Image: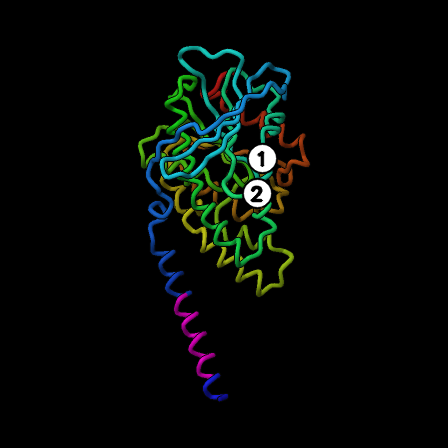
Amino acid sequence: MFKKSLKYFFSFHLLLILTVTIWIAWVYLRDPLQAIDKGVSVLNIASYQETNEQIVSQKRQYIDYHLQAESGENISVYCSFPDSIPVSGLPVMVIMGGLHIGRQNFSFIQSPGNNILIIYDYPYSPEYWYEGTALTEIPKIRNAVLDVPSRLVWLLNWIRKQAWADSSRISVLGYSFGALFIPAVYRLAKSHELSLEAGIICYGGADIRRMLYTNLKKNHEPARILLSYFAATAINAVEPAHHLPYLQNEFLLINGNKDRQIPEESWLLLHRLTPDPKTILILDEGHMHPDKPALTQKLVKMSQDWLISKGIINP
């Protein structure tokens, strides 16, 4: 009986090791662009809600859109419009922020100017990114992460068809968690011949494994190494290092030299891999966070000033 149990034990673990090895090989041999490309699905408005809430001093119109793809997938966005829009449309800034997002994040943009702001709402319930149990939630989180670039392309395609958008001046701005997706989004958009203006990668980095390892401080060393490796493997297709060399747009890169979440090696790699033309700003600051409203407003102002200087958005 003991020998039989031992045989089953080794057979199971051998099968497990073989399965994991095949999975890792498949992930790293697969073209990352192909792994995130779900084509361009047409979006239609499923529902929307207008609000008269005044978030900033400038008079604005706020609309929450719930869009539905042909495949049945849903995309939610928060939009901020000026009081009047010319027939030619206005510049559009699509904002990918941290996980704690919502319409109230418009309050960090005190002077939005004569531009349209759209905040993208990530798929999957935000609290599960932090609190979900590994076995049940990690596959869902993986799918949600890999879905983001295609969903953004669908959204960008929808935006450029709207009468209120100046289709020649659409930019995507990534902050913190959102910065992770910008290289993949821009590369995927280019592959579908979607023209975008210059973008912003704020508090981002490259080498997902290193970034995950840095943030898994509560785990013991062996677990920390394994978790960061397997989690990075699971979302390998959005690794910025895979997509940065293919970018042709101009970018503003902002990082903080006191950041404890994005290690210096990661943001230096991001800077090195991003092709010219690019503007790099390194602040004497830690990582951005909703609990640091002054820093967030500072970063927003720097972003706006840079985009205005390039003629991409209106003052």
Q: Is residue 82 left or right of residue 23?
A: right
Q: Is residue 6 left or right of residue 102?
A: left
- Against 203, residue 300 (above or below) is above
Q: Quadrant of residue 219?
A: bottom right
**Mark 2 crowd level (few <14, some 14–19, many ≥20, 10 Å Cα):** some
Q: Check if mark 2's residue and mark 1's residue have beta carbons within 8 Å.
A: yes
| Residue ID for mark 1 | 101
Q: List x then y, in percent, for residue 74.
A: 45, 36
Tag shown at residue 126? 2
- Against 116, residue 172 (above or below) is below
Find out whether residue 15 is within the magenta segment.
Answer: yes
For image coordinates 38% across by 56% down, the residue present is 27
For image coordinates 48% across by 83% down, the residue present is 5
Q: Is residue 125 left or right of residue 73?
A: right
The mark that comes first in sequence, 2 or 1, is 1
Q: Secondary structure at mark 1?
A: loop
Q: Is residue 305 visible?
A: no
Q: Is residue 175 visible?
A: yes
Tell me the amino acid under the disc marked 2: Pro
**Mark 1 crowd level (few <14, some 14–19, many ≥20, 10 Å Cα):** some
Report the magenta residues as a range.
6-19
